[in-house]
Amino acid sequence: MADQSTTVPSEGNDTTGNSTVEPGSTSPGARGAARATTNDPQSPSGHAELRRESDIPPGIPANGTITRRRLLGTAGATGLALGAAGGAAGYAAASSSASSSEKATPLSSLGAGEVMFHVKHQPGITTPLQARGHLVAFDLAAGAGRKEAAALLRRWSDTARRLMAGEAAAQDDTGIARDAGPSSLTVTFGFGHSFFARTGLEKQRPDALDPLPDFSSDHLDKTRSNGDLWVQIGADDALVAFHALRAIQKDAGSAARVRWQMNGFNRSPGATAHPMTARNLMGQIDGTRNPKPTESDFDERIFVPASASPDTSGDPAWMANGSYAVVRRIRMLLDDWEQLSLKQQEDVIGRRKSDGAPLSGGTKATETTAMDLEKTDSQGNLLVPINAHARITRPDQNGGAAMLRRPFSFHDGIDADGTPDAGLLFVCWQADPLRGFVTVQRKLDRGDALSKFIRHESSGLFAVPGGAAEGEYVGQRLLES
């Protein structure tokens, strides 16, 4: 699993996501007792974030136990409406009968988390890691073009907005998530290279969507790569996530067909005694060096400028506040990895397995201790090996190249020979994939110790526009330009 660009633990961008808590968000432990802010698209941060316990209005217990009556009672003042709008039967709505309305039906803190749909940047990018994820790519049906694509994105955006608020889908809702709250559901939409030719919008295709180069670690299955349209779904409840996946698939109707679909997972929020960086299926802490929204150049590295234009940023105006997602299915060769001794595993990564501390830091080092790349042992050997994954992927070893890694682990069964089909659904975000992913992956190709224990099996690159404003659908500025 090549790290920063293609794999698992990325030093330059070690993240499977829970390592940092974004401004205005809650940690995995506290996150359950929170819900989302309104996140005005014009706000300074604009990220889809969750509200801290201190921001929860009176009448809602800080421990996240929210009765449905209390929930609805605070909706007018705070926007905390998990029930359905327009008379639809919302999953978190109180019962209509007088007898049942008197009963306190607690909605757990995990289910109460809500992420806003109408935000500056689409949800699911800076949102803290979610426990369950689905990645799915679609191809437009034969004969479908720009008109059909616009109608589809309008349907998808409406469904995403409703489901993220804990409401039922507008048409033929399956009821799968009927008993749950929003569970921090996010739905994110992107466009592949082929989409623009299919819709007659070639002149609007960003240069940054040029196909990725070939890498020596690639063993790509083209049937599970690329696609006209891409959807990322994340939630803290498996049924809520599947409900969204099914709704998105049904909405596609005759306009598009599924090209490929993958399922992933992460550790559930609150599963650890305190917030901490997540681990991947190799047992390594993964996410230590991920860029943080608090860093002054975070937006510059991760998002297309709000003033995007071909003459200034090189991106078309419709990509303002958007980002580019590189998606890779990276199989971990776990049987081979687990035959290594603990020291061998740590040398491959460059960090201690127990706590993520750099091998150069000594016994008192922690995960955040700065890595000393020149430090040697008594025999003159580098403490962080020259081909260690954490060394190779550091931004300062790659001209400052960085990306926001937000992957999911996957396990798709056991092969006939007993080998687990498991690894990482690698998703990384950057303002420019050539400067981000490609730069680091080329470096990894030249001698990353981790490369012999991973295999890149599918790949995709997608342009993900900025968030939809109130009354808009995602991609409207492209499709109606």
Image: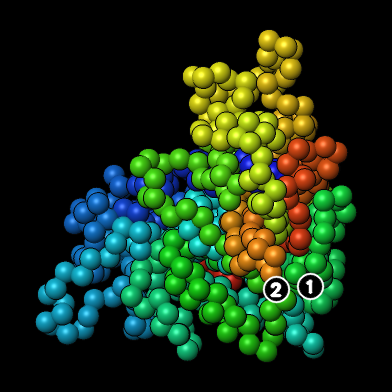
- Relative to 292, is 33 above or below? below
- Relative to 411, is 157 above or below? below
Residue lying at 74% horizontally and 17% vertically, measured from the top left: 381
Residue lying at 34% horizontally and 62% vertically, measured from the top left: 112
- Relative to 479, is 275 above or below? above
Q: Are marks 1 and 2 in contact (CB under 8 Å)?
A: yes
User: Which numbered tag is attached to residue 255?
Assistant: none
Quarter-wise, where is residue 203 in the image? bottom right
Residue 312 place in picture, x, y as percent: 79, 46
| Residue closest to the eye, 451 or 434 | 451
Q: Residues within 10 Å of mark 2 (few under 14, many from 20)?
A: some
Q: Residues within 10 Å of mark 1 (few under 14, many from 20)?
A: few
SS state under label 2: strand
Distance from disc 1 to disc 2, alpha carbons, whole Å, reads 7 Å
| Residue type, numbered disc 2 | Trp
SS state under label 1: helix
| Residue closest to the eye, 312 or 290 | 290
Residue 94 place in picture, x, y as percent: 24, 76
| Residue type, numbered disc 1 | Thr
Question: Would residue 386 be found to the left or right of residue 250 on screen?
Answer: right
Position of the C terminus, as image quadrant, is bottom right
Residue lying at 63% horizontally and 36% vertically, measured from the top left: 341
User: Which numbered tag is attached to residue 260?
Assistant: 2
Question: Would residue 157 be found to the left or right of residue 77 on screen?
Answer: right
Question: Would residue 317 be found to the left or right of residue 82 on screen?
Answer: right
Residue lying at 82% horizontally and 59% vertically, measured from the top left: 219
- Look at the image and tell me whether residue 287 can be seen: no
- Look at the image and tell me whether residue 111 can be seen: yes
Determine which residue is flagged by label 1: 223
Please tell me which of labels 1 and 2 falls first in the chain: 1
Residue 129 place in picture, x, y as percent: 51, 52
